[in-house]
Image (cartoon, rainbow, N blue to C red):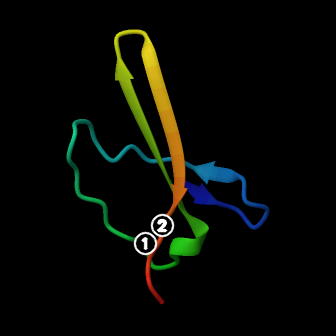
Amino acid sequence: MRLNREGKAVRKERLGKGAVMKVEIPFNPAAYRLQVSAAKGSDVSVAVVTLNTPI
């Protein structure tokens, strides 16, 4: 998710489906969050994390 200056999501992009996928870190990682959703039957879990990259 791309965030605006207030920290609200302004754009979401689906990266793919499946247990494994490649993610390219954007130029300004502080302006992004990674949202992961997992579902099994009617159970759904969602997690949002920062892109924890070294400086």
Frontmost residue, 13 versus 30: 30
Sequence-first tag of 2 and 1:
1
Mark 1 Cα within 10 Å, few/some/many (few <14, many 20+)?
few
Q: Is residue 42 above or below residue 38?
A: above
Q: Secondary structure at mark 1?
A: loop
Q: Which mark is residue 26?
A: 1
What residue is at 38 percent from the left and 70 percent from the top? 25
| Mark closer to the observer (2, 1) | 2
* Count of numbered circles in the view: 2
Q: Which mark is residue 4?
A: none
The picture places residue 43, in percent across and down from the top left corner, at 44, 16
Frontmost residue, 32 versus 36: 36
Frontmost residue, 33 versus 40: 40
Q: Which mark is residue 51?
A: 2
What residue is at 58 percent from the left and 73 percent from the top? 30
The picture places residue 35, in percent across and down from the top left corner, at 49, 46
Q: Is residue 7 above or below residue 26?
A: above
Badge 1 amino acid: Pro
Mark 2 Cα within 10 Å, few/some/many (few <14, many 20+)?
some
The picture places residue 31, in percent across and down from the top left corner, at 60, 69
Badge 2 amino acid: Leu
What residue is at 72 percent from the left and 53 percent from the top? 8
Q: Is residue 4 above or below residue 13?
A: below
4 sits left or right of 47 in the view? right
CA–CA distance in space, label 2 to label 1: 9 Å
Q: Secondary structure at mark 2?
A: loop
Q: Is residue 22 above or below residue 5?
A: above
What residue is at 55 percent from the left and 63 percent from the top? 32
Residue sitting farthest toward the bottom: 55
Query: Which quadrant holds residue 6?
Result: bottom right
5 sits left or right of 54 in the view? right
